[in-house]
Image: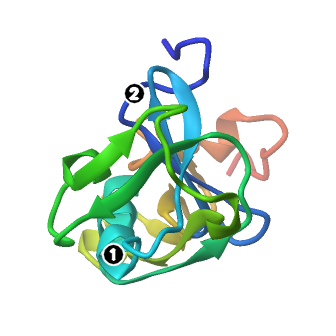
Amino acid sequence: STPEGGCSSGDVRIVSQGPPNMGRVEVCINNAWGTVCNDNLFGSQEAMVLCHQLEGYHREGASSYPAPREGPVFLELLSCSGEEDSIFSCLTFSHGAGLTTCDSSQGSAGIHCLDIDECISANGGCEQRCNNTIGSFFCDCFNGYNLDEDQFNCNDIDECANDTLNNCSPN
């Protein structure tokens, strides 16, 4: 279950007015969302870690940019190598609401992540068709088939057994 704040400590997300792979970074600490300061340490290595942590995006090619400040600052003065699995594994000198020296003119950190095309490898695990989306993918089926509950396999529809699809002749 999701806590009252709508997140679990350690979660990250992109808050976007446009494409879902580009926007202001928010992190969850103590079940509340906050921003990351766009200070002079936040750059491409930190963006690489965040894009990797979000899943569905490449580390490589990630970039950072200043975003408008909204909400409390939870992380600042980050120093990442770019290889960490979580932004919370990076060296930081401050975190938590109210524990920031981030100036309001610095704004919030924004990132732009490059999509991973999950459909390239083994058709994304889909039995028939794989459809890549920004940050994710979904499977679907050819005409005459329905997508199984597992969301990967397809089941043949018996058109003769369905009155709305029944184009079958007695011969």
| Dot in front, 1 or 2 | 2
- Residue ranking furthest to the right: 164
Looking at the picture, the colour scheme in use is rainbow
Q: Nearer the viewer, residue 105 or 168?
A: 105
Q: Where is residue 34 in the image (x, y as percent from the top left)?
A: 57, 40
User: Horizontal placement of 16 versus 112: left or right?
Assistant: right
Q: Nearer the viewer, residue 146 or 93?
A: 93
Disc 1 vs disc 2: Cβ atoms closer than 8 Å?
no
Residue that badge 1 annotates: 58
Res 155 visible: no
Q: Residue 26 carries which label?
A: none
Q: Say what amino acid the circle numbered 2 marks.
A: Ser
Neighbor class of circle 1 (other Cα within 10 Å; few <14, some 14-19, many 20+) is many
- The residue that appears at 75% across and 51% down in the rendered structure is 169
Q: Where is residue 39 in the image (x, y as percent from the top left)?
A: 48, 69
Helix, strand or loop for disc 1: strand
Q: Say what amino acid the circle numbered 1 marks.
A: His
Neighbor class of circle 2 (other Cα within 10 Å; few <14, some 14-19, many 20+) is some
Q: Where is residue 170 in the image (x, y as percent from the top left)?
A: 72, 45
- Rendered view: 15 above or below 122: above
Helix, strand or loop for disc 2: loop
- Rendered view: 115 above or below 2: below
- Residue ranking furthest to the bottom: 61
- The residue that appears at 60% across and 24% down in the rendered structure is 6
Q: Nearer the viewer, residue 105 or 6?
A: 105
User: Horizontal placement of 70 versus 8: left or right?
Assistant: right
Instruction: Calculate the distance from the C-alpha at mark 1 to the C-alpha at mark 2.
Output: 23 Å
Residue that badge 2 annotates: 9
Instruction: Locate residue 59: give its quadrant.
Output: bottom left
Q: Where is residue 27 in the image (x, y as percent from the top left)?
A: 48, 43
User: Horizontal placement of 24 versus 80: left or right?
Assistant: right
Q: Nearer the viewer, residue 150 or 90?
A: 90
